[in-house]
Amino acid sequence: MEQGRAEARPARALGAGREAAESGSAVETGSGAASLVESGLGEQWRRVRARLHAELGEATFNSWFKQIELVGVGDGRVMLAVPTRFIRNWLLSHYAERLSTLWSEEDPALSRIEVLVHTRAAEVAPVAAEPQAAPAPTLTPAAQIDGHAAPRHVAQAAPRFTAPQPTSASQIPNGFEDAGVGAPLDPRLTFDAFVVGKSNELAHAAARRVAEATDVTFNPLFLYGGVGLGKTHLMHAIAWEIRRRQPERKVLYLSAEKFMYQFVRALRFKDTMAFKQQFRTVDVLMIDDVQFISGKDSTQEEFFHTFNALIDHNRQVIISADRSPSDLEGIEERIRSRLGWGLAADIHPTDYELRLGILQAKAEEMASRNGPVTIPDGVLEFLAHRIVSNVRELEGALKRVVAYASLVGRPITLDMSQDVLRDLLRCNDRKITIEEIQRRVAEYYNVRLADMLSARRARAVARPRQVAMYLSKQLTTRSLPEIGRKFGGRDHTTVIHAVRKIDELRAADSGMDEDVDLLRRMLEGGNGAS
Ligand SMILES: Nc1ncnc2c1ncn2[C@@H]1O[C@H](COP(=O)(O)OP(=O)(O)OP(=O)(O)O)[C@@H](O)[C@H]1O
């Protein structure tokens, strides 16, 4: 099993700042905006930066915050500028909330963050700004902000906000930076950080092959599987690997939703030629979550042409979806069939071993980033047994336990984990059946299933029967009479007696207590491992 480091991808839900920037609303400081020096904003900005520096440490601060410039404020918003779209998107997806909190602590009237990308000297362009909608705002000139010279590329005075022109793919540096159409890639989602098990080995092998090949192998590579099972992780990993091996290749990764958004925008600005040009001149195009364009006819049409043009020119296309090409309802038949022409590799739900491997890798990664974390034996196993829905939730559960322990200053224990994750555990609870309990208990005590359901009263059979009744009461929602009926038509008072008896025995006999607990964990985990 390959293991490595990873951590959660950037949250998909974006903070208020991102909304503001994406909405394209222009920033006005208002005519009465005082200079930053006069208003004390420069000082507030220094305090916000100092707090971020203290919270995040030198390395993170330098990577993401050192290059931010405060451009202006107004209308409840703080406007910052950064040199690249990559930094902008990263800041918004990771730190928008923190930044707005820190600013509103400085001044409750400032609760939204807008991050702009420095463009040409006379222009600061918020993404997707609407030229018609935007009044020519008065920016507080950067030179006034801190009383320093204006930062390079930041607007000197009252620039107009302009809609960024779609850039051609030839402008994509290193074939990687998204040039406004793609999404920033998460540096943590690499092959090294991807743990391989039975359920994802085909998808992983195919992804590796595509990333390592110098020619086009499977076209398209179609990765599919349920929510949170690693499709996006693999796509990012392919992009990073291609960048490492063949930096001259132009790689474009974006979600199907973003594809549609760009397309609609191109239609609106009557700029479809530039749109087509952008997409059709890349070497590798990756579109994530293609099911999103189900039922969206014109986007599908454009996607189909883009897809065909790339495949015809022997450019690699990689698509992901939550289901197989043939199951993509709402997507035209001709597209579904073409999507299946290359290699379709599915990712199955994880098994216990893979979940445990992923947890170990994530725990190591956390420790390497934040210092040692002591996770006692049994906690990772417990999580791997109980959080079976998907890897995103599994990872979230681990983070929650570690964060809780660190906040309350207590060591991590099994009890604490159960407590902290109560809601998540409930959602992940499998529906355990009485039949399953009977089978498992019979196997455990080495008695015949038929005997457990029979009228036999010998202790060797009666005790396991009582344990099975007890577990049926604990782990299912069946009523006492229903349980009784499933045990050879017994009366509900027999079930009550069994439950009492096992409770007493558990209290008096630690061996019995352990047996019952182990059986419970086996049943809840859904497999035989303890
Ligand atoms: N095999 C794995 N090894 C390490 N981390 C994994 C693995 N599979 C998934 N993850 C992690 O689980 C999280 C969710 O994965 P990802 O976003 O790739 O899922 P997805 O299949 O694209 O989900 P969605 O259908 O919601 O788009 C990510 O943090 C990812 O790093």
Image (cartoon, helix red, strand yellow):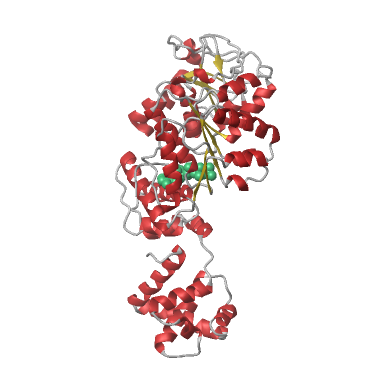
- Picture residue at 47% right of the left edge, 85% below the top: 451
Q: Position of residue 214 (x, y in %)?
A: 41, 30
Asked if 362 appears above or below 502 in the picture, the reply is above
Q: Can you tell which quarter of the image residue 174 is in?
A: top left
Residue 471 in sight here? no
* Figure check: 45 above or below 457: above
Please state the horizontal and vertical placement of residue 102, each as a whole percent of the image: 47, 31
Closest to the observer: 358 or 23? 358
Residue 440 in the figure: left or right of residue 486: left
Judging depth in this view, the residue of 328 and 367 nearest the camera is 328
Q: How many marks?
A: 0
Q: Is residue 300 visible?
A: yes
With respect to residue 444, does 173 lie above or below?
A: above
The residue nearer to you, when weighing 49 against 290, is 290
Q: Position of residue 330 (x, y in %)?
A: 68, 43
Left/right placement of residue 505 relative to residue 219 reads: left
Position of residue 364 relative to residue 134, above or below, is: below
> Which of 484 and 273 lies nearest the eye of the viewer?
273
Percent x, y for residue 73?
55, 20
Q: Quadrant of residue 296?
A: top right
The residue that appears at 55% across and 12% down in the rendered structure is: 123
Q: Quadrant of the C terminus?
A: bottom left
